[in-house]
Amino acid sequence: MQFKKMEFTNAAGQRLSARIDQPADRDPAAYALFAHCFTCSKNIKAISNISRALTRMGIAVLRFDFTGLGESEGDFADTNFSSNVDDLVKAAEFMSDRYQAPKILIGHSLGGAAVLQAAGHISAAVAVVTIAAPADPRHVSRALGDSKDIIEQRGEATVALSGRPFKIKKQFLDDMASVRMQETIRNLKQALLILHSPLDDVVGIENAAKIFQTARHPKSFISLDNADHLLMNKRDSRYAGSIIATWAMRYLGTEVIR
């Protein structure tokens, strides 16, 4: 694949770092928008492998760093689930202006919950894919451990997540509590593909079951077998990418494989 670095602005006018991965030998048949996992970045290996699998089948992928993460501007402490959703909507608008509006929305972990929530605001999208996603964003509070009580009492706390310190404010918890995720999933109009590993010890497989049971058809579930939450084994992320591309072809209204 070939790629290009770029940037766009969020609702607050802050610069968000992005890159677009495109097929090297042809014009894209469709575009996908990828949302990374909680406290991750656009550059984790699993996303690269999934993007590579998609571009091989003619689908371009835009991935970006949420506000306050990676190479994007902003303070992570001032962000929340709703701001992530807003970032996705802005990314889709940017794609529409610069290339084409995304027809596929893909999200990993909390990013999966975010694309489910954003789907209702991105009218061009015809397919949504979640990878190891929680059925409710409040699941993230488990990662905060005892710090959650401190945040509730003091208004904020510094929490170690993935080996790095992050300041979490009470507004982050309050925002997650306000999300009506089941209603969002029940009203989803796009085709839905759920990928999840039964061995995921970060976001349990019961989350995939809840999303699947709540969503309307068309919906599909694919087990990622022995994969871990972050799809660290490249074979798992490559497999996920090939499945996503093949499944999405049914809903794109175009032939993406030569």
Image: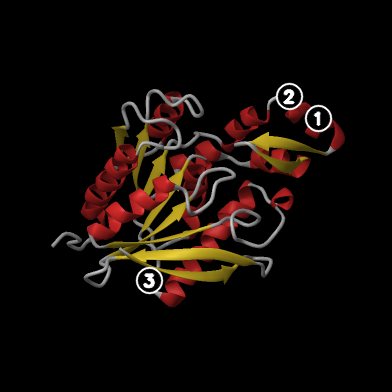
Secondary structure under the numbered disc 2 in the rendered image: loop
Residue under label 1 = 150
Q: In which quarter of the view is residue 90 placed?
A: bottom right
Is residue 190 among the parts visible in the rendering? no
Name the side, left or right, on which 233 lies relative to 147: left
Q: Tags 2 and 1 in contact by the CB under 8 Å rule? A: yes
Residue 53 sits above or below residue 141 on the image:
below
Element type at mark 1? helix
For the point 43% across and 34% down, the residue is: 211
Query: Tag 3, which secondary structure?
Result: loop
What amino acid is at disc 2? Answer: Asp
Above or below residue 36? Residue 206 is above
Disc 1 marks a residue whose amino acid type is Ile
Q: Circle 2 is placed at which residue position?
A: 146
Q: Look at 27% across and 68% down and name the residue there.
A: 28
Whichever of callouts 3 and 2 sits on the residue coming sooner in the sequence is 3
204 or 212: which is nearer to us? 204
Q: Which of the two residues, 4 or 104, is positioned nearer the viewer here?
A: 4
Q: Nearer the viewer, residue 226 or 155?
A: 226
Q: CA distance from mark 1 to mark 3?
A: 45 Å
Q: Earlier in the sequence, mark 1 or mark 3?
A: 3
Q: Residue at x 73, y 52 (%)?
A: 78
Residue 218 at x, y percent in the picture: 29, 43
Crowdedness near tag 2: few (<14), some (14–19) or many (≥20) residues, C-alpha within 10 Å:
few
Residue 230 visible at all: yes
